[in-house]
Amino acid sequence: NICKKEGKERMEQEKRGQFGTNFGFLMAAIGSAIGLGNIWGFPYKMGANGGFIFLIIYLALVSFVGFSVMLGELALGRKYGMGVVGTYRKISEKYTWIGWLGWLSGFLILAFYSVLGGFTIRYCFGFLMEIFSAGAGFGGMDSGAFFGSFTTNAPMSILFHAIFMGATIIIVMGGISGGIEKFTTVAMPALFIMMLIVVIRSVTLEGAFVGLEFMFKPDLEALKEIGLMRVLKTAAGQMFFSLSLGMGCMITYGSYLSKNENLEKNAMIIPIADTCFATLSALAVLPAVGAFMYQGVEGVSFGAGPGLLFVTLHRVFSVGMGGFMGNFFGALFYFLVFIAAVTSSISLLEVCTAYFIDKRVGKGLEPDRKKITLIVGLTIFFLGFPVAMDGLGAGVAGGAMIDIPATLFGMKEVRVAFDCWLDFYDMISEGVFMPLGAMLMSLLIGWKLKTTLIKEEVEATPGYQMRAYNFWDICFKFVVPAVMLLVLLGQLDDFFGLGIF
């Protein structure tokens, strides 16, 4: 019976697919972590939260929380050999709903993420057209005017949303080794090289020292003004979302790993690589912004907010650098952002498709990956229509006023009106489902299943003994649940204005 069970599991794993090499897995997993959260989120959050102080807090959180959650998700995925829903169902039927939190998070995030990914394609094409004919790419408009006109042009937003989603679907259709691994083993090294080119140009601009000082010179006055708890909350949220934790990506990718791969080492390499890339992203953005602040270019600042990627940096390339070099580096930078976005979007789509593939394989049927991927991808594409059509809250196509009454923690009722579908999807997924799911996972591993489950799975690799078990044990039981609670409260505070921080 044991032999039959093992044979069935091997057959199911072969049908589901597997990473061909550990390098291929690492490129896919690092690609999942590296996305818009690094290139867009990290620089502007660092810029708005005291620079170097934010970086130090971020690194500490990665060390004590990022490593642990990463290891937990990879171990659960490899142990049970299924996607996020199937993994929790195998643990116990009563925990299946935790898996659905991750699955729904990936579904909703990709619906708006692909719209933003489409923006990166438009900007890359824009700068390429500007190289050949001035005004052809952006119609002679300044960065703010162009961004406003593009985001409120629903047909154009839908078109580039479709292009980005189409690229994601095609890659995932190819399977684990033939699609995802094949793409990321080429894309990630290329992404790193392109980022280095942009960094070198950024730090050699006249006045770049202003941005470098901002990044690496401690500013205790800024910390006092912003408040330690708010900086901690922001850094914790950025760390968590940047690493693609809590949405089932790493559980799903872990399910395609063989027993020969070193989980403990991989769980450390992925966050380190992601953090290095986030720091490189800041080096690509903040010194350039600082340089043009120094040169007196209007409309650029370190704390420009989400507009940093599509408004401030557009101005940096078109006005600050200008000419052929400005357009060249603009096209290169936005192509880089596009690649980073795609490597994350394919992991989100894989989370969603893995559930249906697992169901078919469990019934002894062929997975039919291409058909499932196409249906799920198209469903997510149509779910992204409201995001593409509402002009990010500009009221296009009738707007998206979503009025939500809520009573939280026994407090008086609060009402939140979302005039932007992106914020609404974001509130459900990143605001509640992801941090809640990660917190429950850590509590489940630390106190119910016990961390010995992780130890056993890590040591399932032939000849390997877990080296830092006591560290992981403390993190899972105490540190991770506390930080995840902080992230959850921080997200609720941001969305509902509870006045916690």
Image: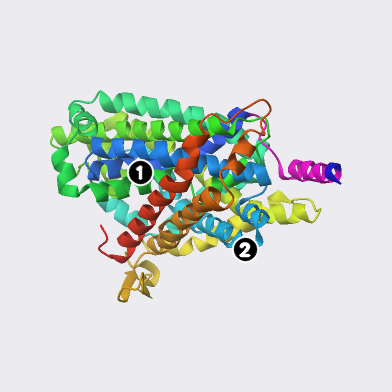
Residue placed most toward the observer, 337 or 358: 358
As for residue 9 lying within the magenta part, the answer is yes
Predominant SS along the magenta part = helix
Amino acid type, mark 1: Trp
Dot 1: what SS?
Answer: helix
Is the residue marked by circle 2 packed among few (<14), some (14-19), or many (20+) residues within 10 Å? few
Q: Which residues are magenta?
A: 4-21
Dot 2: what SS?
Answer: helix
Instruction: Determine which residue is flagged by label 1.
Output: 40
- Residue drawn at x 37%, y 49% is 237
Q: Horizontal placement of 396 versus 343: left or right?
A: left
Instruction: Determine which residue is flagged by label 2.
Output: 94
Alpha carbon separation for disc pair 2 and 1: 38 Å
Residue placed most toward the observer, 44 or 338: 44
Q: Quadrant of the C terminus?
A: bottom left
Can residue 141 be seen here? The reply is: no
Amino acid type, mark 2: Lys
Can residue 73 be seen here? The reply is: yes
- Residue drawn at x 50%, y 50% is 442
**389 up-or-down from 374: above or below:** below
Q: Position of residue 317 (x, y in %)?
A: 28, 36
As for residue 389 lying within the magenta part, the answer is no
Residue placed most toward the observer, 166 or 455: 455
Is the residue marked by circle 1 packed among few (<14), some (14-19), or many (20+) residues within 10 Å? many
- Residue drawn at x 58%, y 57% is 99
Q: Position of residue 54 (x, y in %)?
A: 27, 40
- Residue drawn at x 19%, y 27% is 209
